[in-house]
């Protein structure tokens, strides 16, 4: 679970750096034509990480100024959504599923061990009853 969190942070960090360097106030794409609304979205790494985190959860309203200023940015954000949501969530689901499989396997092994102990105890009781019955038969002769 820890590594999934690290992966999410790395994906957010990489895309936020790209956003700050390409679209931010001194970005390479817009240069002097920076719209204040667009520049305010990607004005720093932490701000853009938060905006991308919100976008990762499906809320794209804060990115509308970017989409209007740079229509091609929709393609970049589609890639971001695919990587962040589908890939990372698939990994998260795989980790949780693996943990559940391991827990079920451990539980099954514990149940089998308990059944084996119970069978051994029943066999010991039967053996003791059989020995006692044999002694009774010998004593009555």
Image (cartoon, rainbow, N blue to C red):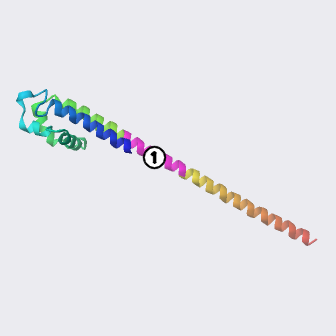
Relative depth, front residue between 94 and 35: 35
Q: Position of residue 106 (x, y in %)?
A: 54, 50
Quadrant in the picture for residue 92: top left
Quadrant in the picture for residue 131: bottom right
Left or right of residue 57, residue 89 in this image:
right
Left or right of residue 134, residue 124 in this image:
left
Report the number of discs.
1
Dot 1 falls on a residue whose secondary structure is helix
Left or right of residue 93, residue 60 in this image:
left
Q: Position of residue 20 (x, y in %)?
A: 17, 34
Q: Position of residue 15 (x, y in %)?
A: 23, 34
Q: Residue at x 31, y 40 (%)?
A: 8
Q: Position of residue 5 (x, y in %)?
A: 33, 43
Q: Is residue 31 above or below residue 109?
A: above
- Residue 38 falls inside the magenta stretch: no
Quadrant location of the C terminus in the rendered image: bottom right
Q: Is residue 132 above or below residue 50?
A: below
Left or right of residue 56, residue 105 in this image:
right
- The outermost residue toward the bottom is 140
- Residue 101 falls inside the magenta stretch: yes
Q: Main structural element of the magenta stretch: helix, strand or loop?
A: helix
Quadrant in the picture for residue 120: bottom right
Q: Which residues are magenta?
A: 91-106
- The outermost residue toward the right is 141
Quadrant location of the N terminus in the rendered image: top left
Q: Residue at x 78, y 66 (%)?
A: 129
Q: Residue at x 37, y 44 (%)?
A: 2
Give the labeled residue for mark 1: 99
Q: Residue at x 13, y 39 (%)?
A: 41
Q: Residues within 10 Å of mark 1 (few under 14, many from 20)?
A: few
């Amino acid at each position: 679970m820890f590594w999934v969190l690290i992966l999410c942070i790395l994906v957010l960090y990489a895309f936020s750096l790209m956003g700050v360097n390409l679209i931010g106030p001194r970005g390479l794409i817009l240069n002097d034509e920076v719209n204040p609304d667009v520049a305010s979205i990607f004005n720093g790494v932490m701000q853009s990480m938060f905006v991308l985190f919100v976008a990762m959860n499906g809320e794209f309203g804060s990115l509308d100024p970017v989409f209007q200023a740079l229509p091609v940015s929709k393609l970049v954000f589609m890639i971001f959504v695919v990587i962040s949501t589908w890939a990372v969530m698939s990994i998260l689901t795989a980790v949780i599923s693996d943990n559940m499989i391991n827990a079920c396997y451990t539980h099954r092994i514990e149940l089998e061990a308990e059944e084996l102990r119970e069978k051994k105890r029943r066999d010991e009781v039967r053996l003791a009853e059989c020995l006692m019955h044999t002694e009774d038969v010998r004593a009555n002769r």
